Amino acid sequence: MEQLSYKQLEKLLEGVLKPGRYIGNETGIKSKDISTDSDTESIVFTALVFPDIYEVGMSNLGIQILYDLINRNKNFSAERVFSPWFDFEDNLLKSDLKLFSLENRIFLDEFDIIGISLQHELMYTNALNILKLGKIKIKSADRDETDPLVCAGGPACFNPLPVAPFFDFFVIGDGEEAFIKVLDVLKEKKKNKKSKKWFFDNIREFEGIFIPDDYNFFYNDKGLLEKIEPERKIRKAVLKKIDDFDIVKNPVIANIKPVHDRFVCEIMRGCFRGCRFCQAGYIYRPVRYRDHEKLVSQCIEGIEKSGYDEISFLSLSSADYPGIEKLIDSFTAETKNEKISVSLPSMRLDSFSFNIARLIQRGRKTGLTFAPEAGTQLMRDAINKNIDKNEMLECMATAFREGWEKVKLYFMIGFPDETYEDILAIPELVKEILKMGRELLPGRKVGRIGINLSINAFCPKPFTPFQWAGQDPIEVLEDKFAMIVNHLPKKAVNVSWSDPRKSKLECAISKGDIRTAEAVERAFKKGARFDNWSEYFNFDVWENAFNESGLNMDFYTSRKMSKEEILYWDFIDTGIKKDFLIKENSKAEEILRSRKESDTKDL
Amino acid sequence: MENYKIRFKFQKINEFKYISHLETVRLLIMAARRSKIPIRYSEGFNPNPKLNFSFPVPVGLGSLAEYADMEVCEKIDLGRFVIDLNNNLGYGLKILDAVFHKEKLPSLMADISVIKYVFRLCFDDKSILEEYKNEIDSIKKEIKSIWMYEFSESQDDADIVYLNIFGYTKMLNDNKIFKFNDFLINLRYLSNNKNVGIMDFFKEEAYVIRGDILKTPMDIV
Ligand code: SF4
């Protein structure tokens, strides 16, 4: 296998801003050592690609899980590849060298298979760029038997069509069992020198495997999807017994500080809350909890092996893990000499989870996070975010009395049938909280009160009850946001806002179809990269790319799809029936209709 | 609780010369935690390990002589300390030596005054060596930050000559502070003109001054 030499690496690193991103050699590396295990013919080599920079990719749990799992098998070896930053890419191109993996510095095109993790739509161009830098043709149809297989997995793949032409196949759903099964077949292919066709024929029936070549999409003259052939649906892969796989106890420790620099333990997968806008809540079902006792012992082992002083109990909604307080208690009791701090990301705060916040922040009182998402109770009911305002305020009252000074609030705007009332309720709520804080905070702390308000644009997503909805046009979203800002108190509130053009693109691609892939390719060829990074995001490039592909972004974003329409992603079976989503959608519509009838202050 | 101070020396070479100082500190602390070394922490809400380093070597320059002082809560076995840490670190970051020290020593940052850098040079034509030496001498006079320099010829390879530069890291008399990267640019320019190849360079040792003598931070413990 061809590798980059150390001398070549040194040359490539000249003048590079953060050379530590490219050096590998981390603690926790598990790939096969190809200088000693010289029998490379009998080992299947996987490049695990995360198409963002090292610090971001090294914080992704999915990559660590697959890396650990693949490398535990003596027949397989996995190595990591991340997006190079612009300076390193320039050096690669100037020296005419191919992108390589971090462990053995194997050139990308030498691998048997390249698996790319797609977390969200705004990393698609980075994924294509990685292929290009590895001198691999970006389109599946242009690659032949000598090229590596290229596949994708991750949450964004639930609607695979906007990137379908670039991948030979997709693994949809949980990767643990599904990907290993694929590698087993690949091992046979390599050993017996079988064709790619033979390989596809042998993985086709597996759960979660989508091979784009197998499917055809027919449109009518209005540009609507008329038929998907064959009718066979792709059932997502589900890991049934999550405890069959231990958490990753000895992760690769990043050489330079990753964005999340802590030990991560996934305590459960899935979320039963059913917020109607939330794709993760639907695609990760069913909810699976890890066993309490096993978690405690695995986490202790993990903390010892990794050397971290912080642990994160990760899941979509960690406060919903049954016995979460007990879990934190048993873990902290066992590690009390080591000063390990605990964090729970994505906390849905109510009075119950406030106790947990108290538990984990142990006197530090850094801040409380609430995600009511919508301003009025009615809209919260419609989106099924069952946070009760009074309960929330009561919980904040307790917090203020105890001296917590900072509150973080998450809202979304642009929900279907949203009104002025919903929008104005947001600054009203903020004012109410501030007033309460000023009354309740102990004397000298009053001046330090602060609210961080984060506003995002609603983006209808496939496989949610709102999948048929249209997204508000950019101007409308901007008006709504301005309205919020105008009504906010000037002091003590800090508001941040996600770029609505980014949300629009995210929506256009996530609700996209096979035609969208052309726009993705064009945008990439026009230089789009790091679309998720505000400083590099260029909306005009994307708009032109859509137009030149004969597409109108609005067709995907603002158009309300009809319930009778065949949806582009209807051939993917997440285990949740479309009828159920329709019913959920009607419930939301009904709630909102009740208001329309009494009041017509529509925007 | 009793206090024990360990002074240790480590190398930062190969790939790890590309890791910044802050990242090196992070990696060493994590390795110490994995090795279950009872590091002392400062008091307060954000306890920090009691660990102090010598002046950071520039990113990209390998070093055979980085130093640090660490406080631990128990008198641990130093042999184990070195072995355990090295089992938890890659070869690029490797502990070379460790000693306990009792009396109050000046901090490494304040004490280290001179650093020795080694350049491995390749002369196609040895006859220009004198000329080259003169050029180095005029650089020394110009930049005022070199304590001394010396040339030594390689035993095994006739074309190779070592240039050792002792640069000041502190203002002592009327000297300036040696800036490695600036010097390297100068040296590259000079070597290019004279057709001399710079094959390799690294930081070999750090010194404190006692009397008029250079001593390593380990010597004075
Ligand atoms: S928004 Fe949070 S709580 Fe609601 S369904 Fe999604 S993950 Fe669960």
Image (cartoon, coloured by chain):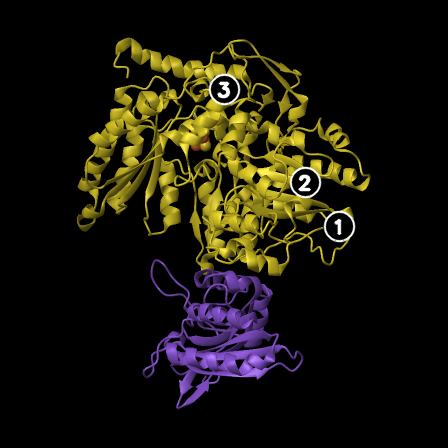
Chain colours: A yellow, B purple
Instruction: Give the mark nearest the N terminus, 1 or 3.
Output: 1
Rounded to the nearest angstrom, the CA distance separating label 1 from label 3 is: 47 Å
The residue nearer to you, when weighing A198 against A591, is: A198
Q: How crowded is mark 1: few (under 14 residues within 10 Å), some or many (20 or more)?
A: some
* Element type at mark 1: helix
Most foreground residue, A4 or A313: A4
Query: Label 2, label 3: how many angstroms apart (C-alpha)?
Result: 33 Å
Q: Name the residue under label 1.
A: A40
Instruction: State the image coordinates of residue B169 (x, y, percent, origin top left).
Output: 39, 76
Residue A255 x %, y %:
52, 56
Q: Which residue is drawn at 55% across and 50% down?
A: A94
The residue mark sitting in front, 2 or 3, is: 3
Q: Position of residue A390 (x, y in %)?
A: 28, 29
User: Does residue A27 show up?
Assistant: no
Q: In this view, does A245 lie to the left or right of A527?
A: right
Q: Where residue B162 sits: x, y (%)?
A: 56, 79
**Residue with the mark numbered 3:** A550
| Residue type beneath disc 3 | Gly
Vertical position of residue A573 compared to residue B187: above or below = above
Please tell me in which quadrant of the rendered image residue A370 appears: top left
Please say if the residues under marks 1 and 2 sit with CB atoms less than 8 Å apart.
no
